[in-house]
Structures are given as structure tokens and as C-alpha cells.
Image: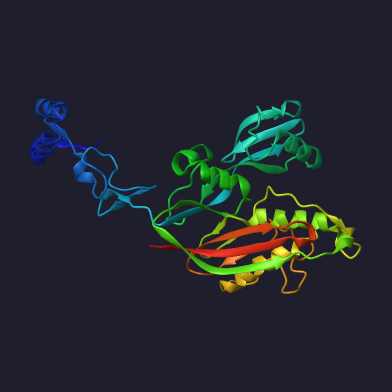
Amino acid sequence: MRKVPLFSQPTYIVEYVKDYQFGDIITALLTGVVKTPISQITSGSITRSGLAGDFKGPGMIEVNNDKLTIKLPESFIWGFKSAYKFAVKTDNGINIVENNKTIKTVNVDNINNDTVSPQYISSKELKEWYNDSEIGDKIAIDYELSNFSDGRNKVAPSKIKQLFGESTVEYMENYPAGNPVMVYMANYKEVDAASSVSYLGSYPEYGDDKRAFNARAFSEAWNGTIIPPNTISSGKENVQFTSSRDPEAPGGYASHGSCPPARALRAIANGAGFPLPRGMTWEHDAVLFGFNPATGIKVDNTGNSTVKILMWTTGSNANTKIYAQLVKLVPN
């Protein structure tokens, strides 16, 4: 705290009297030097004692007119999932690298869920990567939030739950790096913008049970996806699809059953005025070969409102119906 001669700022004593800070008063009188009161360098929602109050949500400290103040949270705040910590392959194990510095070295025989956090990648997956990679290759093993919509600083993994809650951590675990992650929503209403229904139908040559499985997986991958304005998002990355034999597909296999829900997703994106999702076509077979139906397809929200995608299914096998709905989240 900055200190000044008491004779130059005698009114500072009055500020300490108001706050019953008698220790600071005595020190000032004995030394002739007084600390600058909190009230002289803060304003807005920061109290005289230096605490933030009178608002809800993740506010942000900023300087306004040479005083510290709290920037109140907007209705929506989002950041982006970004790689924070890497495993780098060495000749006998991995180096754990954070901010371009090696913080731990792990022998290949000691790679387990105790030596490497399994939140985003299990020790089994890490060992498989190790066996298939070259020395010097790296893989992300932990993630931060960065590039926030309101300009706040990056948030390290250890602080995300504390600042934004468990739901934000869970969303990050579900979606790939680079996707937007909504960390705060308040004072808004939901407005239906578009909806669509698609039917699986029967193509027994590809196995209707497998096709129904993929239709449900597609819906699960996209259900609950939130896309802020002027951002692009895929679906979840922890959803699995099954393949059916198809001699016309590259590699001889394809995730049949993904196209009916993809047509429903395409319809609501188009209904909201968005461009054709990446990884899709305008044809009946809506998903391009080589694109994962969950992470390869990307919806580009070119509008001015945050949107949420809802998808679900009813029925089974060839009678499966797929529903898609796009909801705008509009500030009150």
C-alpha cells in the first residue's frame, strides 16, 4: 500500500476513523506517514474494506479513471479450451511440459494414473500414443481456458472449478480443444429458432441396429452444445460410433446411420441462417466421408446470439426418429 506524509493528506486520517481502523491511525500519528486508504484507489463495487460486493457472477478487476473497479459480468462469458500441459516423448519416457518448462520426467514403465492425471487422457491411451509416436512428439494432457469474450486473463486448470463451477469442467472434458466453452450465463431467455425431425428408415445391408446406434450417438454428441456468436463448435469427442461394411466407402467401412441426424442438424443450422456445417453436404448422404460425425462436423454461428443445440431420439432400429432443435439464448 502506498504511503504519504501525513501533513500532505490529513483527510486520510478521517477515512480511517470512519472505518474504525485505530491501529493505522496510531501508526500514522507516531510516524508521520499514512497509508493511502482503500477508498482512494477503488470505486464501484469494491467496498471501503477492499472487498468486492453488490453483484453476482465472475466479475473482473479493471482500472477506470486511475481507480480499481469491478467490471460486472455480462449475460454471457465464454472462453476457449486450450492446451496447457503436454507430454513430450523422450528415449525412455516422457517429459511433462508446462509453459515451455519441464516440470516432471516419467519413465515409460512408470506411466500410470498416479504419475499422469487421467482427467483428459488415461495412462493406457498415453502408453498407446507413446508406442506409436516419435521422440520429440508431444500430446496435450491438460487444458486451460483462454481468449475470453470479456478480455480476462487465461485461467489455469486448477482454478477453473473454483471460478466457474463443476459444470464448466465437465463441458471441457466432453469437447475438443479449440471449442468455445460457456463459463457463465445469467439474465437471459430461450427463444426457439429452428427445429427438424428426421427418420432413420431401413437399409438392412448396413445393419439397422448399427445405424440406430449411430443415430443415437450422433444425437448424444450434439445435444447440449452451446455456440456463442461468431464462434465455431463441433460436438462432443467422447462419443463412439460403430462402422458397417461399405465397399464404396474409403477404407471399406462407414458410420452409417449418421446421415439422418446430420440432416436434422443441417436443417436447424440452415433455419437459423448459418452456413452449411463443415464436414457436410447438401445431399441426402449429408456427412462427407472421412469426417467424424461428432468432432469432424462443425457448426458456424454467424449470428448475433448464443445458441444451444438440442437433439434426441425416439423409437428403435429402423423406426428411430431423430429430433433437432436450435434455441437462441437472448439477454433479458
Residue 198: % across, % down: 70, 67
The mark total stands at: 0
Left or right placement of residue 38 versus residue 147 in this view: left
Viewer-side residue, 59 vs 201: 201
Viewer-side residue, 292 vs 256: 256
Color theme of the render: rainbow
Left or right placement of residue 286 versus residue 233 in this view: right
Viewer-side residue, 244 vs 86: 244
Image point (65%, 52%), residue name: 236
Q: Is residue 244 above or below residue 21?
A: below
Q: Which quadrant does the C terminus fall into?
A: bottom left
Q: Which quadrant does the N terminus fall into?
A: top left
Viewer-side residue, 275 vs 85: 275
Q: Quadrant of residue 41?
A: top left
Residue 22: % across, % down: 13, 28
Q: Quadrant of residue 88?
A: top right
Observer able to see residue 277: no
Residue 26: % across, % down: 11, 26
Image point (57%, 74%), residue name: 273
Residue 11: % across, % down: 9, 41
Image point (69%, 28%), residue name: 106
Considering every residue shown, the one lying at the far right of the view is 247
Observer able to see residue 17: yes
Left or right placement of residue 219 versus residue 288 in this view: left
Q: Is residue 239 above or below residue 103?
A: below
